[in-house]
Image: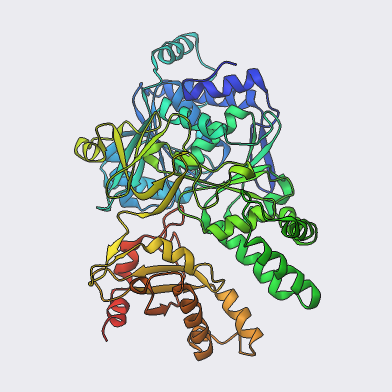
Amino acid sequence: MKTAHRLFELLPLQLQQYNLEVCLADKKDGKWRKYSTQQVIEKSTQLSFGLLSKGISAGDKIAIISENRTEWNFADVAIQQIGAISVPMYPTISEDDYAFIFEHSETKLVFVSSEEIYKKAKNGASKANLDLPIYIFDESKLTEHWSSLLENGSEDQKKEMEMRQAQINELDLVTIIYTSGTTGRPKGVMLNHKNIISNATAVSERAEYTNGHDRVLSFLPLCHIFERTAIYFYFQLGLSIHYAESLETISENLQEIKPHGFNTVPRLIEKIYDKIIDKGFALSGIKKQLFFWAVNLGLKYNPDQSMGFVYDTKLSIARKLIFSKWQAALGGNVKHIIVGASAIQPRLKRVFWAADIKILEGYGLTETSPGISIGLPDPAQAKLDYVGPLLTDVQVKIADDGEILVKGPNVMMGYYKDQQKTDETIVDGWFHTGDIGELTPDNFLRITDRKKEMFKTSGGKYIAPQVMENKLKESVLIEQVMIIGENRKFPAALIVPNLDAVKNWAERHNLDKNDPDIINNPEVRNKFQSEIELTNQSFGHWEQVKKFEVLNDQWGIASGELTPTLKLKRRVIKEKYTNLIEKIYAV
């Protein structure tokens, strides 16, 4: 079977092998817009000709700032086909970040999805003293619609595009993805065709999809390499890609599309689980007993171990009576879910596997395109405490201090315009991940913490915050939590409560759930204290949380505490709660 070596070859290969009626689909004004493989190729090619007409040269940088939608892919493929470089950006970042990236990347043209983003991009360009042409995907009178660029192409243009494509090598730069650095200024990760295609191919080897038939739902940001590489392996396998309307409509879209799989981040799996548990608490009598009997059974599950005849019999009953409803809530067809971007609680993997919903945890970074390892769908090789075996052609070694070092075709070309940072990160061909881990003789990888997030207490003891945070989030009452205590006497916790769960708990214990100050109710405080004490049993004395504060705030992307992939912005949170942190350690 012929394989692609450059990203723009993926769709023509899909046309030859599968010729899908629905290659891409999204929802607009309540109706699904569907595009066949042929139509996606045609739209992208017409857009390529339009970019040629605007004088876009090979190597020019073009920004895409948009939520997930079909036009994102049209622009992406159109840029690739003429040897230009895409610069995808989060719609949620600030005007100052837009200004920096436009200037740093030397952006020549911008695609945006909406008027709101157009205004931010326009202001960002102005701050950078740039007069950039900006094209919009939505209908708008503010600027030119993207469709104004669509052209059928003259004979000269067709020859020009063929010539450019013939000159593109698999090792040529195809995209620059800006990822936040410790200084606060984004770093431009340079990835070539081989980086991404090798990774997409390696990940597709782990999938259980039926090529040319299955459907997937996509909702993680396409500007993040996790979902973007996934889109390319969906292209490879001939899967129909449907973009969710928003994070808020995922449940509805799952029922509409009934996908065979999707990618997500741990926080969304946690939210799904918390909602399921809330529904369990709302039951009564034998139904409630059966529900929690099934959940507790699932939390003990190890797919790669023999659980015994009695356990297997009980699990079979639980799957019929309880877990089948979990599958139905995801559309009823899900074969597996790939989870990445941060660590997921092992207990969640256990209970979902018990429900016959396979969670395949992946590990990687933008700099590794992104995959380094990913779990296997074969129960006999599940090993839920690991992030799977290494991907094909990816090498890992563990440094003396425990840091994970990576070498392979997936490792980035370097940071754009920053040779010093590149040389600090890639040493003797090995990329330094900044993560701490362990590698088994059969190449299964376990992540223990972020090297940069680990800290010492004033007593000189190391604290691995992410491990503790994941354990604390096993409490249904805790929405988010951050462990603090660097150079302090002891670890403490800033807790964002799951208010719905707190109110449900209060109601079950005859408290006024509508009390606006419910989180400061003494009984509620005592409940949080007992949850902390329960978690502390899993850790050494020096690691145990001695004090905590339950916050009235909710952390989000827009308010600045979370990244677009829902990871904690630790520096931002510390700065925001400086006074509260000082209060915790005042005594």
Q: Position of residue 339 (x, y in %)?
A: 54, 48
The residue sitting at 48% across, 87% down in the picture is 520
Question: Which of the pair 176/264 is nearer the observer?
Answer: 264
Q: Position of residue 559 (x, y in %)?
A: 41, 64
The quadrant of the rendering that contains the N terminus is: top right
- Residue 176 found in image quarter: top left
- Residue 218 found in image quarter: top right
Q: Left of 171 or right of it: where is 142?
A: right
Q: Left of 352 or right of it: where is 290?
A: right
Q: Position of residue 22 (x, y in %)?
A: 68, 32
Q: Taking 437 as reference, is 389 above or below it?
A: above
Q: Taking 166 as reference, is 225 above or below it?
A: below
The residue sitting at 27% across, 67% down in the picture is 461
- Residue 286 found in image quarter: bottom right
The residue sitting at 48% across, 85% down in the picture is 525
Q: Position of residue 342 (x, y in %)?
A: 45, 53
**Count of marks, rendered view:** 0
Q: Is residue 243 visible?
A: no
